[in-house]
């Protein structure tokens, strides 16, 4: 992942599901090529193959289960997701939290299969714990701000700044992203000014009248 990085988590909004997952990927692809900024699509598992066939965007899964091939009905197996087209995954999103042992296992699988791991955390302490596991990226998101439109980079700058400081002191190669409420160019610029390598976001883009314009605005102040 080159910096600055924009990771768009599609979650399970209808505006980013099915055929709309593809439309959003096209918007991401043109915004990425117009701006030169790395943009990553994170569709639902069922939409990964469709998006990977039609775009050349980097695609992450929203969640990978800590399982091996076999009897695990309803789970997300890393091998299948890689076949479908992912080059990385979110891990431990606040809306799909995992046990520490499972986070460690999935980070290791990502390393073994040479895909990228972006672990979501809810505070500075968790970010430090996760950094010790050496993922490619840590994305700090205060859960109370998720989906509110109140940007973490402006409402709680200290959590971004301190997460950057603590994580980089453990391993300076780990990318640090922030998320929750990030929507505008000012929100992203504040995140980068605080030392972040990029942002993880969802509703501000997915719910926008024109997601492509919203993406271009997001990166307009870099
Ligand atoms: O994964 C992104 C996230 O949880 C932030 O969501 O809607 O506040 O941008 P949102």
Image (cartoon, grey):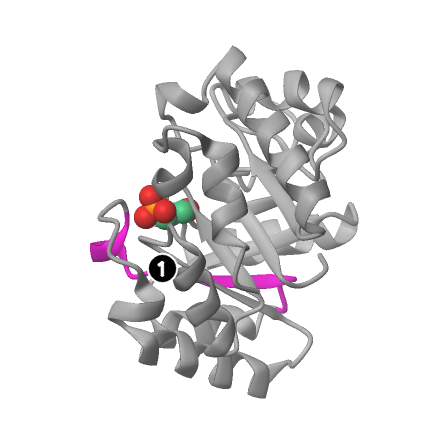
Q: Does the residue labelled 1 lie within 8 Å of ligand 1?
A: yes
| Position in image of residue 177 (x %, y %) | 51, 63
128 over 35 or under it: above or below: below
In depth, the one of 191 and 118 nearer the eye is: 191
Q: Considering the image in quadrants, where does the C terminus appear? A: bottom right
Residue in the picture at 62% in, 53% down? 117
For the point 71% across and 35% down, the residue is 57
Give the residue pinned by disc 1: 141
Mark 1 element type: loop
Is residue 147 toward the left or the right of residue 96 in the image? Answer: left
Q: Where is residue 209 in the image (x, y as percent from the top left)?
A: 37, 28
Question: Where in the figure is residue 185, as x and y percent of width and height?
Answer: 45, 57
In the figure, is residue 78 to the left or right of 154? right
Residue 5 covered by magenta stretch? no
Residue 141 lies in the magenta stretch: yes
Q: Nearer the viewer, residue 118 or 99?
A: 118
Span of residues in magenta: 134-146
Residue extending furthest toward the top: 19
Residue 6 point in image, percent of width and height: 56, 51
């Amino acid at each position: 992942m080159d910096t600055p990085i924009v990771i768009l988590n599609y979650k399970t909004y209808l505006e980013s599901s099915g055929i709309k997952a593809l439309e959003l990927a096209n918007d991401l692809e043109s915004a990425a090529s117009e701006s030169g900024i790395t943009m990553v699509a994170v569709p639902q598992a069922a939409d990964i193959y469709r998006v990977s066939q039609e775009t050349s965007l980097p695609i992450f899964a929203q969640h990978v289960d800590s399982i091996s091939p076999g009897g695990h009905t309803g789970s997300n197996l890393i091998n299948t997701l890689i076949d479908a087209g992912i080059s990385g995954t979110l891990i431990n999103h606040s809306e799909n939290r995992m046990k520490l042992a499972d986070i460690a296992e999935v980070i290791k699988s990502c390393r073994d299969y040479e895909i990228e791991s972006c672990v979501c955390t809810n505070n500075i302490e968790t970010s430090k714990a996760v950094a010790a596991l050496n993922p490619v990226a840590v994305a700090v998101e205060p859960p109370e701000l998720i989906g509110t439109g109140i940007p973490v980079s402006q409402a709680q700058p200290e959590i971004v700044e301190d997460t950057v400081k603590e994580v980089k002191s453990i391993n300076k190669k780990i990318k640090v992203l922030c998320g929750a409420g990030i929507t505008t160019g000012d929100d992203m610029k504040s995140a980068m000014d605080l030392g972040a390598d990029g942002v993880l976001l969802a509703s501000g883009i997915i719910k926008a009248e024109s997601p492509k314009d919203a993406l271009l605005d997001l990166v307009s102040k870099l």
